[in-house]
């Protein structure tokens, strides 16, 4: 998933970006509502982490504009404000959840997952493909009941392909969900991750569609 982080505090913004990237997310970081609106027009985000105390346009106003302009992904308000009135106003304006500063990164990641499930109308924490089970919350994979050790990016590619079962995802689509702005991406990075996944999970799981991308076909009905 690609996340847009809005935070005008340089130290907190950088720490949050690094922490979420280590958890497997691609995180683009902006410091104003104006830049957030521009980023949303140019990129597809599964979640926006929205600071209320932004310079220029207030975060609550920015939230209303985002929803009015058609953004339908998850919005998680990250704020030092913690009054009931502000929470109600934020929820009415279209926020999916609130988290109060200072926060724990593991809790933030859990709230992101929960908000995104609600935004997508999906309550599953597990993706199942035959004897392959991917546990989204615990970031664990088993095949035939045995654990399979994957890197963060291998896990994320597998999750994306399973979530879009039967649909071909291009290398560019996968890269956009794996890497943040300015991240160094080698031209064959996705191909290498796919190669490692095939070694660990079997050659036939991920199908290459020549000159288009990669796909995990839906299991055939019994």
Image: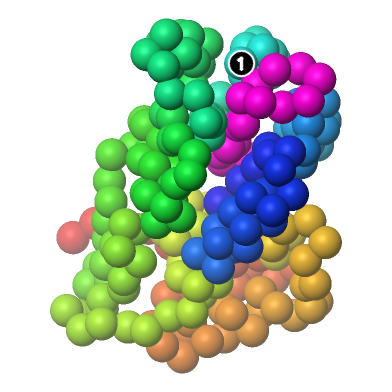
- Is residue 43 visible in the rendered image? The answer is no
**Quadrant position of residue 138:** bottom left
Compared across the picture, whether 181 is left or right of 2 comes to right
113 vs 37: above or below: below
Q: Overall secondary structure of the magenta stretch?
A: loop
Q: Is residue 52 magenta?
A: yes
Residue at 37% in and 31% down: 118
Compared across the picture, whether 12 is left or right of 115 comes to right
Residue at 59% in and 36% down: 48
Q: Quadrant of the C terminus?
A: bottom left
Determine which residue is flagged by label 1: 60
16 vs 75: above or below: below
Counting labels gives 1
- Is residue 145 visible in the rendered image? The answer is yes
Q: Secondary structure at mark 1?
A: helix
**Quadrant position of residue 121:** top left
Residue at 42% in and 8% down: 85
Residue 137 or residue 143, whichever sits in front: 137
Q: Is residue 214 magenta?
A: no
Q: Residue furthest bottom?
A: 199
Residue 182 position, x and y percent, is: 82, 61
Compared across the picture, whether 198 is left or right of 9 comes to left
Compared across the picture, whether 9 is left or right of 111 comes to right
Residue at 77% in and 66% down: 183
**Would you call the spot at circle 1 few (<14 residues within 10 Å), some (14-19), or many (20 or more)?**
many
157 vs 16: above or below: below
**Quadrant position of residue 33:** top right
Residue 52 position, x and y percent, is: 61, 25
Which stretch appears magenta?
A: 44-59
């Amino acid at each position: 998933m690609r996340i847009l982080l809005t935070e005008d505090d340089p130290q907190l913004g950088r720490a949050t970006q690094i922490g979420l990237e280590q958890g497997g997310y691609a995180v683009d970081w902006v410091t104003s509502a104006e830049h957030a609106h521009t980023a949303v027009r140019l990129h597809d985000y599964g979640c926006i982490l929205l600071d209320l105390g932004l310079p220029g346009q207030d975060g609550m106003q920015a939230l209303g504009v985002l929803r009015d302009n058609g953004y339908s992904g998850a919005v998680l308000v990250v704020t030092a404000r913690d009054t009931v009135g502000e929470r109600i106003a934020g929820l009415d304006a279209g926020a999916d959840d609130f988290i109060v500063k200072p926060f724990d990164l593991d809790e933030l990641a859990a709230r992101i997952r929960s908000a995104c499930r609600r935004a997508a109308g999906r309550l599953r924490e597990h993706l199942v493909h035959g004897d392959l089970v991917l546990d989204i919350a615990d970031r664990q994979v088993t095949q035939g009941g045995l654990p399979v050790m994957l890197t963060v990016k291998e896990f994320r590619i597998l999750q994306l392909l399973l979530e879009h079962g039967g649909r071909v995802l291009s290398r560019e689509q996968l890269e956009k969900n794996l890497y943040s702005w300015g991240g160094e991406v080698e031209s064959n990075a996705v191909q290498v991750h796919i190669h490692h996944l095939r070694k660990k999970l079997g050659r036939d799981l991920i199908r290459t569609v020549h000159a288009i991308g990669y796909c995990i076909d839906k299991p055939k009905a019994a």
